[in-house]
Amino acid sequence: MPLIAFSVLTLTWAMNPWLATGVILLANFFYVFMSPLLAAGMIVFSLLSLWLAHLMGFLIVPLAASIFILTWIVQFVGHDIGGEKPSFFTDLQFLLIGPLWILAWLISTVFPSLSRKYYG
């Protein structure tokens, strides 16, 4: 999911930086109500993604498009092996929540005391 988020964000940035900024703002508006800590983490992820896109220049479009296609193939193969229909077909929120799950896991792994304090 983070690679899908990265590719969508960088492809959007390549098309129109203002549109990418709007996507970041709208997504983080949603995230801040779920968890201010995770929203801050997603802002950092977004800024790092855009910084990388800026550094790569025109090469980011084929790279991000390739990442997008490959990660969706892996996503569908994984769901086929697991015998489950991808949940994002039923609700767009799952596309937004997926990266938060990964970020929450990362925070709880790297900073266990912070996650216990913050999540209870």
Image (cartoon, helix red, strand yellow):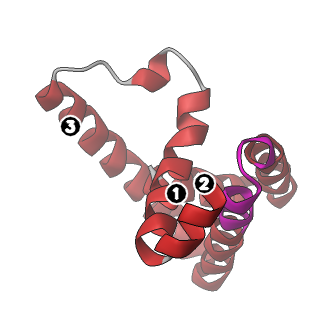
- Residue 119 in sight here: yes
In the displayed structure, does residue 44 sit left or right of residue 116? right
Residue occupied by mark 2:
119
Question: Residue 114 falls in which quadrant of the image?
Answer: bottom right
- Disc 1 crowd rating (10 Å Cα; few below 14, some 14-19, many 20+) is some
> Which type of secondary structure does the marked residue at label 2 adopt?
helix
Mark closest to the chain's N terminus, 2 or 1: 1
> Which type of secondary structure does the marked residue at label 1 adopt?
helix
Q: Indicate whether 77 appears above or below 49.
A: above
Residue 92 x, y percent position in the rendering: 60, 25
Q: Indicate whether 72 appears above or below 32.
A: above
Residue occupied by mark 1:
104
Residue 52 x, y percent position in the rendering: 60, 79
In the displayed structure, does residue 43 sit left or right of residue 88? right
Residue extent of the magenta highlight: 32-43
Residue 77 x, y percent position in the rendering: 19, 35
Q: Indicate whether 18 appears above or below 30.
A: below
Task: Indicate the amino acid at tag 1.
Answer: Ala
Determine if the magenta segment contains residue 41: yes
Mark 3 or 1, closer to the camera: 1
In the displayed structure, does residue 22 sit left or right of residue 87? right
- Disc 3 crowd rating (10 Å Cα; few below 14, some 14-19, many 20+) is few
Residue 49 x, y percent position in the rendering: 62, 70
Q: CA distance from mark 2 to mark 3?
A: 29 Å
Give the mark count.
3
Closer-to-camera residue (120/61): 120
Task: Indicate the amino acid at tag 3.
Answer: Gly
Q: Residue at x 20, y 37 (%)?
A: 78
Q: Residue at x 65, y 60 (%)?
A: 118
Question: Residue 110 falls in which quadrant of the image?
Answer: bottom left
Task: Indicate the amino acid at tag 2.
Answer: Tyr
